[in-house]
Image (cartoon, rainbow, N blue to C red):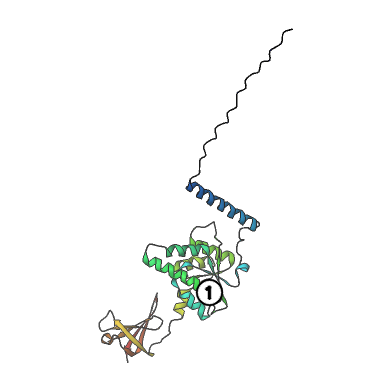
Amino acid sequence: MKKQKTVVEKQETPVAPTAPSVVRPTTAFTQALAREIVKNLTALSEMTTRPFHRAAAPETKESIGEHPILVDTSVLIDGRIFSIINSGFLSGTLVITQFVLTEVQHIADDADPMRRAKGRRALDVINKLKSQKVNPWAKTKVVTDNPSEVNEVDSKLVSLAKSWGAVLLTVDFNLAHVARAQNVRVLNVNDLAQAMKVALVAGEEFAIKITHEGREREQGVGYLADGTMVVVENAKGRVGEDIQVVVTKIHQTPAGQLFFARMK
């Protein structure tokens, strides 16, 4: 009986695969990834800490405060409103809308130096009104309401004044006309200034400083404390002096009264 030969197959030793080369991320990529992670973590934190945050509800007359007074951009640029509030003659809630505040900020950033100065003065007035404590019956509040159905700032103000039953405070003559035509109550600072001017009658005496020469021959010109012009006869040579004068005539102009006088 023949013996069968056992054939042993030679097995090849397996070769370990070559490890892929490692690509290291660049510094810029690492920084960008870190910023993205921080941003996502911040957003997640805000979502978990304020899960029920909702958009602010529109303001109403009741939520704004008593006697709402809607403030126009022109009033803030004018600046006299701060002195009026401090005097105690005005009370209520001064309402400054976000779109008015935005308009003021744009003016303050204008390339023109004059407009930029006016805008910065308006921002200063807003800060003073918000922090004033002289008149406790006057408060200042900034609201975000912005009527979407109208585009112009003046139209937005009139729309809000009508919906809130608020008073519109302005020094803009045209805006005051438009608002009154739509049955909105208007307070015009210029009207107040005219009402506060000194009332003089013919024959009344007072002292005045002659500041410069007049247009006509031998005339001198001075001003009352409220800015009213007084033209004095034969006072050309008295520029820089305080003199006693007598009112001779009163002339009414669109800008107010103009007084004519003679030296006593």
The answer to whether residue 93 is above or below residue 109 is below
The answer to whether residue 112 is above or below residue 256 is above
Q: Which residue is mark 1?
A: 131
Farthest bottom residue?
264
Residue 35 drawn at (x, y percent): 53, 52
Residue 218 drawn at (x, y percent): 25, 84
Residue 221 drawn at (x, y percent): 31, 82
Residue 98 drawn at (x, y percent): 52, 63
One can see residue 50 in this view = no
Count of number-bearing discs: 1
Please report the residue visible at 39 percent of the width from the left and 75 percent of the height from the top.
255
**Quadrant of the image for the C terminus?**
bottom left
In the image, is 76 to the left or to the right of 48? Answer: left
Q: Quadrant of residue 160?
A: bottom right
**Quadrant of the image for the N terminus?**
top right
Q: Quadrant of residue 262?
A: bottom left
Three-letter residue code for mark 1: Ser
Farthest right residue?
1
Please report the residue visible at 59 percent of the width from the left and 53 percent of the height from the top.
41
Q: Quadrant of residue 79?
A: bottom left
One can see residue 64 in this view = yes
Give 148 or 236, whichever is nearer the viewer: 148
The crowd level at tag 1 (other Cα within 10 Å; few <14, some 14-19, many 20+) is few
The answer to whether residue 143 is above or below residue 91 is above
The answer to whether residue 141 is above or below residue 21 is below
Give 120 or 156, whichever is nearer the viewer: 120
Please report the residue visible at 37 percent of the width from the left and 64 percent of the height from the top.
112
